[in-house]
Structures are given as C-alpha cells and as structure tokens.
Amino acid sequence: MEMNQYMEMFIEESKEHLQAMNEHLLKLESNPEDGSLVNEIFRSAHTLKGMSATMGFEDLASLTHQMENVLDGIRNNEITATSDLLDVVFESVDHLEEMVVDIEGGGDGKRDVSDTVSKLKLIEEGAPQGSLPAVGSKAGAEQSTATNAGVPSFDTFEHTVLAQSKEQGYNAYFINIALREDCILKAARVYMVFEVLEQLGEVIKSYPTVDQLEEENFEREFSVTIVTKDTAADVENKIAKVSEIEKVEITDIHLDELGTSKDSPADEKKETEADSSKRSQAKSDNGDNGDKKQAAANKTIRVNIDRLDRLMNLFEELVIDRGRLEQISRELKSGELTDTVEHMSRISGDLQSIILNMRMVPVEQVFNRFPRMIRGLAKELNKKVELEIIGAETELDRTVIDEIGDPLVHLLRNSIDHGIESMEERRKKGKEEQGKITLKAYHSGNHVFIEVSDNGSGINSEKVLEKALERGVVTEEISQTMTKQQIYELLFSSGFSTAEQISDISGRGVGLDVVKNKIESLGGNVSVNSEEGEGTQFSIQLPLTLSIISVMLVEVQDEIYAIPLSSIIETAIIKEEEILSAHNQRVIDFRGNVVPLIDLTEFLDVPRTREDDEYCSIVVVRKGEKVAALVVNSFIGQQEIVLKSLGNYLTSVFAVSGATILGNGNVALILDCNSLIK
Amino acid sequence: MNESVLSDIKVIVFQLKNEEYGVEVEQVKSIERVQQITRVPNAPEFVKGVINLRGVVTPIIDLRSRFGIEEIDYSDSTRVIIVSMNEIEVGLIVDAANDVIDIPTAAIEPPPEVVGGYEANYIRGVAKLEKRLLILLNLDKVLNTVEISDLKSVEADVQ
C-alpha cells in the first residue's frame, strides 16, 4: 500500500499526541484525582494506537494498547495513579517517542518493549489485587469489548436532557451502526448518517465524538444516542437507506433503568471499553466544545519547513535586489521609477512581515519537553522541584527555536543541580522543601527575552572569585575592583564550574561558556543576576529573526559597515573639543553620562583616506547597560539587509557578526556591538 | 598509495611568481576575475577580505602572501580560483590560471626534502612533465584549521 504520503502526517500527529500525553501525565501526577486528565491521555493513546495500527507499526500499537489498558484502569478507579505507576507509563511514553523517532528516521519502529509491556501488565492485573482497592477484574471487561453494544450511561446533564425529552413525548434511542468493511469514504457515510439523524431528531451524543468520526478515527462501528418522535423501526429504515451500512441496531433507552454515571459505580465495571470512552467524552464535553470552536477559528495547512526556508531564501535575494533598485532609482532621479520602486518596497515590506510571521513558532515547542526533564532530574537528585512556565505562547523564528533548546536545557540543569538545594538544606534554611524554577518568555521591542530563574541558593560571589583566581581567569589585581555583576559574568568564561562535585547532570563545567557562545552566535546575549540565598536568574535576549535585520550603514574612511539598529541608541555629531580624555581613554559627556569613544578607523585598522575635520559623527550603541560611542566618518542611512555568514573559513572574526550584500553588489560587514563593548 | 592505481589526474594549473602550481579539478568550483574585495578587519594578513560570489559571501586568500612570496598589484591576468573543501569555500588569488592538464600519477613525486621549511607543508607532490615542473598543492594544509585557530588567537589578542 502507498503509505508514504501519510507518513509525514502520521509522524507529526504522533508527536503531538505523545507531547499531549506527556503534559497530561505530568499534570496527573500532581493531581491524581482529575479524571478528565486520564481521559485526555487515554484519548491520545487511543488515537495513537489506531494510527499506528493503520500504518502497520505493530510494536507501537501493542505498547499503546497495553498503556491504554492501564489508563482505563485508572479511569475506572481500579488502579490508583501513584508516582511509581506513572514512572512506568512515562517509560512507555519514552519508548513510544523513540519508536516514532525511529520511524521518522526511516526505521521500522521496532523496539524491544517486552519489559515495559510486562510491567504494564503487572500493574494492570497485579496492582488491583495488591495495595489498591479493586472491584472486578479489568481483563474480564476487556473481553466483552466492542461486541456488546450496551446502552451507555450518561452524565447528569445528558440524563436531564433525556428525561425532559421523554416527558415531551420524544423517544430516546441508542443506535449502533456498523459500516461495511469495503466502505471507502467512512467520514462521508458518517456524515450522511448524521444528516439523516438530524432530520429525525436531535443527536445527544456519539461515540467516537463527531470530530473523531470526521477524521475517520474509528474502525467500522460507531454509535449515537438520539431523541426523536419517530419509532425505532422508522429510524432504522431511514439509516439503512444510506449505502454501505452493514447493520443498524437500535435500543430503546429507558431512563429509569439508567443511573447517571456518577451514581452507579457498580454499573461502570461491566461497561465495555467503548462505553466507558463514551462516558469520558461526556465528562469532558466542555473541553470538546472548546476544541471545536478552535478548529473552526484556525484553518491551517501543514507546510514542509523546507519550503518555507526556500521561500525565505528567495525573498532574501529579492531584498538584495530591492536595495539595488532603490539605489538605482536614487541615482537616476526619475519620478516614475522612484514611485514604482517605492511601491515595490512597501509591498515587499509587507511580504517580509508575512514571511517572517509564517516562520514564527511558539517557544512552547521547546518548553514543553522541560517539565518531563525537570521531573526526571529532580527524582535523580532527590530534590523537590516545581517548574513554572510563563509565556510559552511567545513566538520566535524557527531557526532560533531550533538552536535555543540546548542552551536552555543547560541552564535548567544548572539551576536544578547547582541552584536548588537539597531538601534538608532547604528545610534548614527555613525555605519550602520544594524548590521552584521559573521559565519565562516575553516579547520586548525587536527582541524576545527568556528567563530561567530559581529560588535556590544563589551564587556565592566569593566562591566564584576564588575559583576564577585559582583557574587564572582573572588576576588578583583586577579582582579587587570587580563589581558583583562582573564577578557573575565570570561564570561564562571558559573552563569554569562552580559545582564542588562534578555530577553527570550539569557535566564538567564546560557549560556556561558554551551557552554564551551559542546564544551570541544567534545574535543574542545572556546575563546573570543573583541574590545569595534567594536565587539566581539567567536572562537571555534573542533577536526575533536571524536572517533579515534593520541596520544603519555608516562609512568609516572608504569602507562601509552595518550596525544593527537594535543596538543603536542614537546618532549625533559632536565637535572635536567635546572629546575629553580620562585614563588614556577618549570619552564624551553624553546626556550627562561619560561614554567611552571608540574610533572605528583605528579599531578596525581602516586605511586612512580622509582628513579629520572638526566635527565627529558618532553612533551611540549599547550592550545591556553599557554604552559606547563609535566614531565614523559619515552616516549613509537605515536599510533592511540580509544577514549572511562569512562562511566556514572565517569562523570567528572579532567584532564582526556577519556580512551583507549591498545595493551595488559589494559586501559590507556587520559590526557586532556586543563584542565591541567590553 | 591510492593514487598510483589511478592513471591520470586532472589539474588546473596556475602561476605564482615564476612557479607553476596545480590543484585538482574536483576541488575547484570556478575561476573568477578579481572583483571588489571587502577587507575584513583583524583577519590574518593573507586573508584579503570577502567578495560577493553570486550572492554567497566568500573569503579570499592571497596565495602569494600565504606562501610568503612578496605581493604584487593585481593585473589583468590575476585570477581568483574558488576552491571548495570540507564545507569550506574560499577564493585563492593567483597571478594567472592558464591551463587544465592531465598528469599521469606516475609522474608525481613526493615533495623534495630540500625545500623544507614553511612552504613544504602545503605541497603534496611535484609533477615532472617534460620541461615543466608542477607543484601540486595540498589544499587541506593550505586551508588548515590551524589557520582558523590562528584567527581565534588573533581575536583573543585583540580582546
């Protein structure tokens, strides 16, 4: 069978379901009583099972099936969701993830999961007899699955609706419909059946849900509950008229025989798998409605990321040509040409924001794997840690998202390993046993900020300094004058680790400098703040996008350089005599602050071709709190440029973050203000 | 040696001062005329800068300077040979690039010991062809990553 076209979709959706399972499992752990969570997990597992079976990944299907059984047990209160039990479930989710990854990589998704399966089986069978209060055996219920289309139980709301309908002279029927095995367009048939039913009366509920039915997430059978004035025979005939229906079974619903699901726990045990799912659907009805609304509001298509990249590349070429056209039109000074070019610039500007927007993805994609990681680490280190995530919806360019994961993992590991104290220590300090790590993302201007903060022990600046001296990162002399902030910055120098003991959690202390390098290579920067005893905060600043940036073009002698607008505070022209001297460093008094002056001609070794005049053009740039003034010869203007790398040969040129191609086809270098300011 | 199995290798011949050098055709992407080069500050002496090679920013190395031969002004015959190796793409400035020839591998000899010193590292072998003597470049060494770490130390010095 030709499955390849579905493969991509299968992988995508499997990942989504696995992620959803992960999230809900975590919530479940802190909130074991919440039945709707179990239902969510169950539904994800169920869909995954169906999908993988269809795609022929038997191992995947069988493991999910086993998980489903356990989840069903939890749902029916036969098994209590203890942490140990969830460990096993997490383990299976891990296996599932790896299988999916394997499939994605072209493998067959096979994996030895017998160990986990047997653990799950143990829980499924053994646990109820052991520590947990159990009623009836789960296995028995399994056997009667699907064939027994018993009338489901209803929640209070549905019960009321049914009761009222009955009073008004309506009949309530439970209808089980099976499609023929060779039915091709299952969703279409379902649609036709619903069409018929809606003419007859009102559909109270269906299993699977309408959504799932539309997506063909069912085998051959589905069931609906309907209130109508027609007789059972009429209904049966009308449904049977839809082609490709194999059988229609109608059961009259007698309300007095039905308890609401909450009132009749005993009844539950006999329920078939299908029925219990139905009930779960009913319980989470509100949630479902929400989903439906959302589905209607966002119509989306999946686009291969490569295509977006190609679109972006083509657009970059266009931006370069736009620059060239703008220059030509300026030189030619033809009104008509200028108008056209301006119009084109505006349109391509709009196009640019749309394309950039398309590439934006919520940081959630990166964040959502952290709760699992933190849970695992906390267990390993025998610490209690809560992870709070704020602003997961914040959007960033996909290229940044792809790269930001590792540094964040590093910082989080750092926080949990070095930051958060052990439980006893926290108790001694009079803190809550459970430590807290906050991961926060937000937009600000042209940047996105991501903060990782913990309420742990904070950074001991003396220890840091001691270590720095020991490792020769700083000299005794300099260390005397260092501010706390500067000492913290030492953490980012290479070969530095503050952990007394090397642990396998946050490695051997090659750490933070790697984080810093990575983030700087993304055009961002990272800083740290700490209050001893109170906690530590790492703050990462990232550009919204990497490929097209706004810059100010300046001339330094005969060379042209680009300075990113994001680091420019303002430009000014000052007189020669306003330049002062302090400690052999030229400075200016700029709006009440003493700002060091960096002459780019000297700094960049530019061959001198121009006479100095009495006026200096300066660009005031900043890096975090620090400010510097760059002396240039003249300003050319502001421009949108495409960031290009210098290639693999010139991997790290000091003070240059990349290059761009100007309107005239020449290359201009982009200055990296972060490394200019020390 | 592996090459002895192959009968011929195709090389692009270029000139530096009075000597002729060869670089394998497979490693050459194109040969360009010298165009506007943008200087890269704080780069090693022999890196002349970067050019816009059809939308790709490509670093340019002056081979004379790389080999410690005195530099001359660029002329009409000066060429930039764009070579690509291990994902690294650079342009090499040479006095002239004038030939493509086949060399029988048998004609290639290891670099003469006497040359020694600085230059010898970059030489993979010497091919004797009737009256010509062709020096075959070891691009790997010419674009050696040590150079890149050199760059890094330059950077560190500046900092």
Image (tube, rainbow, N blue to C red):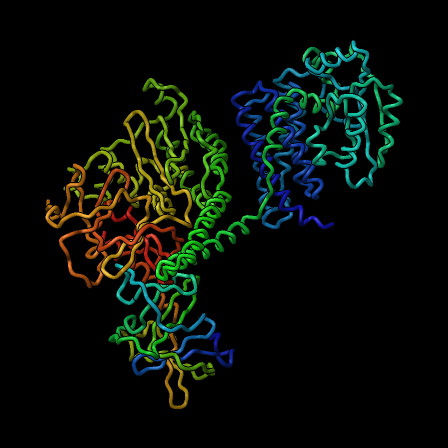
The relative height of residue A130 versus residue B51 in the rendered view (above or below) is above
The relative height of residue A376 versus residue B113 in the rendered view (above or below) is above
The quarter holding residue A600 reads: bottom left
Report the front residue among A573 and B56.
A573
The quarter holding residue A11 reads: top right
Residue at 39% from the left image edge and 67% from the top image edge: B140
Residue lying at the far bottom in this picture: please name it.
B131
Could one spot residue A467 in this view of the protein? yes
Report the front residue among A197 and A130.
A197
Which quadrant would the C terminus of chain A be assigned to in this image? top left
The relative height of residue A190 versus residue A584 in the rendered view (above or below) is above
Q: Position of residue A69 (x, y in %)?
A: 67, 28
The quarter holding residue A666 reads: bottom left
Q: Position of residue A381 (x, y in %)?
A: 42, 30
Q: Position of residue A30 (x, y in %)?
A: 51, 22
The relative height of residue A144 versus residue A552 in the rendered view (above or below) is above
Q: Position of residue A219 (x, y in %)?
A: 76, 35
Report the front residue among B90 and A51.
B90
Asked whether, in this view, residue B103 is left or right of residue A62, the answer is left
